[in-house]
Structure formats: structure tokens, C-alpha cells
Amino acid sequence: MTDSIYVTGLALHAFHGVMDHEATVGQTFYIDLMLDIDLTQASRSDKIADTVGYDQVVDVASRTFCAQRYRLVEAAAGAIAEAILTEFPAVTSLRVTVHKPHAPVAATFSDVGVTIRRARQSASDSSSHG
């Protein structure tokens, strides 16, 4: 499938990180989401009911990202992916990128972060053969 819904540059202030001061001061993170979804029906019907609204995706990602403190952006990205797959059954897979441009690294850089990819498991993937 080649259809996607995406959100890029979602800016959220949160308190994630390994360092103690990150839990106190916090920082702005940027999140990019790429959701794989079949948009055939939505492209024909022109109805919001046949797709996933950007506002809904932003709401789920924001609530999940800010609901608790994560030490690792990997864990935060994973939580977003799980929440989106749970909330939106039409999403078959997704990529979540968390940018941490103000990471406490003793170097000059413009950005660091992680990208994770997750896919919905089909019934045959989760059944045991034996």
C-alpha cells in the first residue's frame, strides 16, 4: 500500500531524558508521524468518516507523549506507536520520529533522535504453530 497520512514537526514540551535536569526544566521535542492506511474509500467518498483525522492523530500522540516522563525517546516513540495502532484500527503500520534537538550532548549538531517502525500484527503472525 502506498497511501499515508502524515504529521511533521509536532512541537511538544516534555520532561524526557536520562539527566536529572531534563526532568526539571524539560525541552521542546519535535515529532513526525507517517501512518500507512488505505485511503481508497476516503478519496472516493470525500468523508472524514472514511479516514483518520489529523486532529485525532495529533491528540493521541500529544497525550501519549506528555502523559508520563520517559528516560529514553525510544520508549516515548514506542508508546506513541502503540497508542496510534490501538486507537486507529485502519492504520496498518507507522513510523514515529522523535527529534531531540537540545539533547545534552557535548557536540555541535542540529538534531538527534530516533525513528521507529511498527506494524499491526495479523492473526497469522500471532498464532503459534505447533
Image: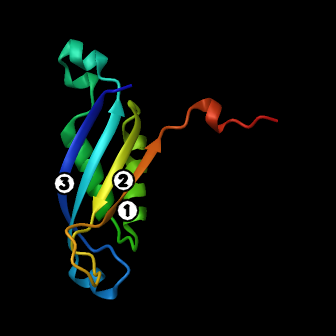
Residue at 34% x, 76% y is 17
* Relative horizontal placement of residue 106, taking residue 79 as reference (left or right): left
Instruction: Check disc 3 and report its element: helix, strand or loop.
Output: strand
As measured in the structure, the alpha-carbon distance from the residue carrying label 3 to the one carrying label 1 is 14 Å
> In which quarter of the view is residue 49 placed?
top left
Mark 1 crowdedness (10 Å alpha carbons): few <14, some 14-19, many ≥20: many
Depth check: 110 or 17 in front?
110
Q: Is residue 63 above or below residue 121?
A: below
Q: Label 2: how many residues lie within 10 Å, few (<14), some (14-19) or many (20+)? A: many
Amino acid on which the number 3 mark rests in the picture: Leu
Residue 92 image point, x, y percent: 42, 33
Q: In this figure, which residue is indicated by the disc labeled 1? A: 76
Location of mark 3 (residue): 10
> Mark 2 highlights which residue?
80
Quote the CA–CA distance across marks 2 and 3: 13 Å
What's under tag 1, amino acid-wise? Ala
Q: Quadrant of residue 15?
A: bottom left
> Three-letter amino acid code at disc 2?
Ile
Looking at the image, residue 12 lies above or below residue 48:
below
* Residue count near mark 3 (Cα–Cα under 10 Å), binned few <14, some 14–19, many ≥20: some
Asked whether, in this view, residue 6 is left or right of residue 81, the answer is left
The location of residue 55, given as percent across then percent down, is: 19, 42
Separation of marks 2 and 1 at Cα, in angstroms: 6 Å
